[in-house]
């Protein structure tokens, strides 16, 4: 069953794109500024948080996932989930190596 | 209840119905085709996520193990070029998204303009990358090719970076050797990214020619849409690469 | 009560339909540039068989060497190359593409009532990538081979051998993309091109199995692709990512490699399980018991299969905590496979069982896969794994599941759908004989290897202590019988192309859309888009169709 074409009914207009553009530019400025400030352990956290926010904006609005079918959202979710699985389970080994032999 | 015997045997083909020229025969409708094509691009993109995933895993592990080396390596990258590249790609994502809008609203001129801008911005990105890579080659920071530890065991010898980061201490030779791993990951990740950009730019060139002929502005914008997804994906990869490679602790 | 369900048309009047996918166009280009999924399936079938026999010949060399305790047939380096190439070819160029690229390609569009896969050109590209990788693998063999084992363990493969690791890695990389594109095609097709009325839970379980395998193909294969790239770069430029002297970790390669290679075993077995669902239903004349459970267990195997990869690394140096976590997760993944075996067994219960060749292979699968799977549990428990890993126990385990399981399922499927693909029936008696010979050969070849493993014979060694010789001789004798068992089908299947009985549309009286059309099918599969209004494995519907057709015939007169 074809369902409805994800973009046939939702033509995202320039206004949305301009808003997102400015949000992304702002985010870039913010993250560069933050890297020059000593925030201790929070530096990488903030950098990744800003990067993720930017990525989410691109995915939702530039890539139209906000207006897409559940299947598209599920597909994106599956990709992210698998990516996180690869990283976290591999890291589970590396983190625990230093814990010694029981 | 349908008569299944009609399915079975070699009956003469039904009269060739009126359908748009771009509709492939194995699809029942243009809508099904566009739907399938879009979904196929998404499945391809999650496959790309996993491809880069291995590199991100390596990065996370080695950054955790050799943090001082990663900091020193990151200081060798010019944050101006990196930020400029990020801005270039973000704007190119914008022009690509606008191109999609033009295709959907049948603005042929607008579409050609947007695709051309995206193309030029993409080339600009690669140009800046070339400048950065050349810098690395000149300073012997390419792993495996006469890699030099000079800048790391003796930061003062590297005047331009030392100006930016005067408080950087010299690394022990052991930790300095691990900067080679940082640069391996730098070249791997940005190189893989650049490869995808080159493919994208090549396809853009083809698309500009087709767009000028009106191929995408007569009701069949699928190609532009799906290429846009690919282009935005490349942008997202760079957003993460920028944060991870360039912005490691630039504070005093 | 007849002892066969085969129902062939009257041979004196039956003809192969004049217009079908084989006769539609002629000439080599019509095959090499085809978009027809059925032709691509045949291209794959021929090339897969070719690679299978190369891999098989290498296996023969291994068994010949192991007849005697000394490494006297070939130098140990050569032996290393032989078993490496055997593994590389069998895994990447036979098992991974086997059922999906042949039967999956041929049948999935037909089973869902579509005219082709969603992306026919990508399908053809998949085949060309497969051929490119395969030719590169053969080139590797011809120019000195590679001796690291198919697992390319670092730092051996990156720093300590000077054999053709780069070209083999490249061959595996290219074959990997072939697999990714096939999986992508299947996922898109199954989601977007099902016929009206064909809901997910009316799909044949063959389709569910391929869907689950495709998820694995798309999400896991890229990781082994990047690991191959890294090996190649490490060897050629010395980037240091797996090099301890530069701070790299060789174990990282293994994490990335096994992240794919464990799901890969499910990529290999799931399509085979799909075949078994079809054959076991047809030859017991019964719906598959617990359809929903079997469907969900396919997806569960796919998902859980992603979480267990480090059970291949228990002794490699990962932390004890990781060993614990992965061992526990491995217990989890055994459950859905067991659910399938239970459900197939319950399908047999009170069914009308007949013993045509596909069913013989199916029974072989059930027994051998169960043994293989259970021995996997011994290996998943880290305590026993420490003793059994890298011994012949592992070799026996994976050959039981892959050869006793997957290859038997592949042969079951080839025999089952041969009449549909070619319009001809193969000769029954000799095919049954081949199935039995294969089973006997298999058990003689691989069962002794379990014992050898427990006794401590290590794998990948050309020589062994003399007390292991008796079992090794048994194993080699079995391998000879197995070889005969595999050769026979090639001979009689090719024979049947010209001299086999005309099969007709539905010689097995099976349900499923592919059986409601001519054999061989039309290029476009269906002249009219079918509408699905009954459940999968609905034998009552099939019976009602038959009655209807009888009535039409009699009432016309």
Image (cartoon, rainbow, N blue to C red):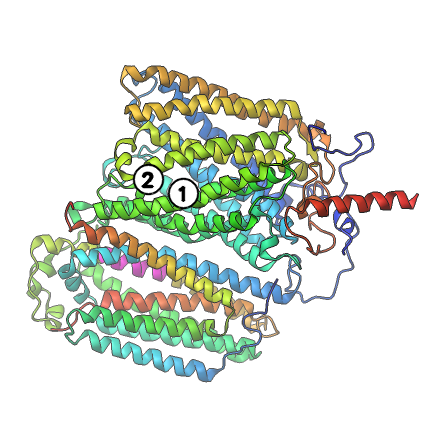
Find residue B43 and report its horizontal and vertical position in percent.
47, 59
- How many residues crowd mark 2 within 10 Å: few (<14), some (14–19), many (20+)? many
Q: Is residue C17 above or below residue A16?
A: above
Q: Is residue C350 above or below residue B154?
A: above
Q: Quadrant of residue B130?
A: bottom left
Is residue C189 inside the magenta stretch?
no
Quadrant including the N terminus of chain C: top right
In this view, the residue farthest toward the right is: C557
Q: Is C366 left, or right, of C278 in this rendering?
A: left
Q: Quadrant of residue A79?
A: bottom left
Q: Are marks 1 and 2 in contact (CB under 8 Å)?
A: yes
- The earlier-in-sequence mark between 1 and 2 is 1
In this view, the residue farthest toward the front is: C350
Residue lying at 29% horizontally and 15% vertically, measured from the top left: C467
Residue C257 appears anywhere in the view: no
Q: Report which residue position mark 1 lands on.
A: C334
Find residue C293 and report its horizontal and vertical position in percent.
51, 49
Numbered disc total: 2
In this view, the residue in front, B61 or C158, is: B61
Find residue C457 and report its horizontal and vertical position in percent.
29, 24
Label the magenta part by its dominant secondary structure.
helix
Quadrant including the C terminus of chain C: top right
- How many residues crowd mark 1 within 10 Å: few (<14), some (14–19), many (20+)? some
Is residue B194 inside the magenta stretch?
yes
Q: Report which residue position mark 2 lands on.
A: C380
Q: Which mark is residue C395?
A: none
Where disc 1 sits, the SS reads helix
In this view, the residue in front, C287 or C394, is: C287
Residue interval drawn in magenta: B183-195
């Amino acid at each position: 069953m074809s369902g409805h074409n994800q973009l046939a009914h939702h033509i995202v207009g320039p206004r949305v794109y301009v808003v997102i553009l400015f949000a992304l530019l702002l985010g870039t400025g913010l993250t560069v500024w933050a890297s020059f400030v000593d925030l201790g352990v929070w530096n990488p956290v903030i950098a990744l948080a800003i990067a993720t926010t930017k990525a989410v904006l691109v995915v939702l609005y530039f890539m139209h996932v906000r207006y897409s079918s559940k299947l598209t959202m599920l597909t994106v979710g599956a990709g992210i989930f698998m990516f996180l699985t690869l990283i976290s389970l591999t890291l589970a080994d590396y983190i625990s190596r230093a814990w010694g032999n029981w | 209840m349908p008569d299944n015997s009609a399915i079975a045997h070699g009956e003469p083909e039904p009269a060739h119905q009126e359908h748009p020229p771009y509709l492939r025969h194995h699809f029942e409708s243009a809508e099904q085709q566009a739907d399938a094509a879009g979904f196929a691009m998404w499945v391809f993109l999650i496959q790309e996520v996993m491809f880069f995933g291995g590199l991100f895993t390596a990065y996370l592990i080695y950054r955790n193990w050799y943090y001082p080396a990663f900091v020193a390596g990151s200081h060798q990258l010019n944050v101006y070029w990196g930020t400029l590249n990020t801005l270039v790609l973000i704007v190119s994502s914008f022009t690509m998204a606008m191109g999609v809008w033009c295709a959907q609203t049948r603005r042929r001129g607008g579409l050609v303009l947007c695709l051309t801008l995206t193309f030029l911005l993409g080339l600009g990105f690669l140009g800046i990358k070339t400048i950065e890579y050349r810098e690395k080659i000149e300073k012997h920071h390419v792993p495996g090719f006469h890699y030099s530890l000079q800048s790391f065991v003796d930061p003062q010898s590297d005047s331009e970076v030392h100006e930016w980061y005067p408080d950087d201490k010299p690394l022990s030779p052991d930790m300095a050797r691990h900067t080679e791993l940082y640069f391996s990951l730098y070249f791997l990740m940005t190189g893989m990214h650049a490869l995808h950009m080159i493919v994208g730019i090549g396809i853009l060139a083809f698309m500009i020619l087709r767009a000028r002929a009106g191929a995408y502005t007569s009701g069949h914008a699928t190609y532009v849409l799906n290429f846009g997804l690919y282009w935005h994906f490349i942008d997202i990869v760079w957003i993460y690469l920028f944060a991870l490679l360039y912005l490691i602790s630039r504070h005093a | 009560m007849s002892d066969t369900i085969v129902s062939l048309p009257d041979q004196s009047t039956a003809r192969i339909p004049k217009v079908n996918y084989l006769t539609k166009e002629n000439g080599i280009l019509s095959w090499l540039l085809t978009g027809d999924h059925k032709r691509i399936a045949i291209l794959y079938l021929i090339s897969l068989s070719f690679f299978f026999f190369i891999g098989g010949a290498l296996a023969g060399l291994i068994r010949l060497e192991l007849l005697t305790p000394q490494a006297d047939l070939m130098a140990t380096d050569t032996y290393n190359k032989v078993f490496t190439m055997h593994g590389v070819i069998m895994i990447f160029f036979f098992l991974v593409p086997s059922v999906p690229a042949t039967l999956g390609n041929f049948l999935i569009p037909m089973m869902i009532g579509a005219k082709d896969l969603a992306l026919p050109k990508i399908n053809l590209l998949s085949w060309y990538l497969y051929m490119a990788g395969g030719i590169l693998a053969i080139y590797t063999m011809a120019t000195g081979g590679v001796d690291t084992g198919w697992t390319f363990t670092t730092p051996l493969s990156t720093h300590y051998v000077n054999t053709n690791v780069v070209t083999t890695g490249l061959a595996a990389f290219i074959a990997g993309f072939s697999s990714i594109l096939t999986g992508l095609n299947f996922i898109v097709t199954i989601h977007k091109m099902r016929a009206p009325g064909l809901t997910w839970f009316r799909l044949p379980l063959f389709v569910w199995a391929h869907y689950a395998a495709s998820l694995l193909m798309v999400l896991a294969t890229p990781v082994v692709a990047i690991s191959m790239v890294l090996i190649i770069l490490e060897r050629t430029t010395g980037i240091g990512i797996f090099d301890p002297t530069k701070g790299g970790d060789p174990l990282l390669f293994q994490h990335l490699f096994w992240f794919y290679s464990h799901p890969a075993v499910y990529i290999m077995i799931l399509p085979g399980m799909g075949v078994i669902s079809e054959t076991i239903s047809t030859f017991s004349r019964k719906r598959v018991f617990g359809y929903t459970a079997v469907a969900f267990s396919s997806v569960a195997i796919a998902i859980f299969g992603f979480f267990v990869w480090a059970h291949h690394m228990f002794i490699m140096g990962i932390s004890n905590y990781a060993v614990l976590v992965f061992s526990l997760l491995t217990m989890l993944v055994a459950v859905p496979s067991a659910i399938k075996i239970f459900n197939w067994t319950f399908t047999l219960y009170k069914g009308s069982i007949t013993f045509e060749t596909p069913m013989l292979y199916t029974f072989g699968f059930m027994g051998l896969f169960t043994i293989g799977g259970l021995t996997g549990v011994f290996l998943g428990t880290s305590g026993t794994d420490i003793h059994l890993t890298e011994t012949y126990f592992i070799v026996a385990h994976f050959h039981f599941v892959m050869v006793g399981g997957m290859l038997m399922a592949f042969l079951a499927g080839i025999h089952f759908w041969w009449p549909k693909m070619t319009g001809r029936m193969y000769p029954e008696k000799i095919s049954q004989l081949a199935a039995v010979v294969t089973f006997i050969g298999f058990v003689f070849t691989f069962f002794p290897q379990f014992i050898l493993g427990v006794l401590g014979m290590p794998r990948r060694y050309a020589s062994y202590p003399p007390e292991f010789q008796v079992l090794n001789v048994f194993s080699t004798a079995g391998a000879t019988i197995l070889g005969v068992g595999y050769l026979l089908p090639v001979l009689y299947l090719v024979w049947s192309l010209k001299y086999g009985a005309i099969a007709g549309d539905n010689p097995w009286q099976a349900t499923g859309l592919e059986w409601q059309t001519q054999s061989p099918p039309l290029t476009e599969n269906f002249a009219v888009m079918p509408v699905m209004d009954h459940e999968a494995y609905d034998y009552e519907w099939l019976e009602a169709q038959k009655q209807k057709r009888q009535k039409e015939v009699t009432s016309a007169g």
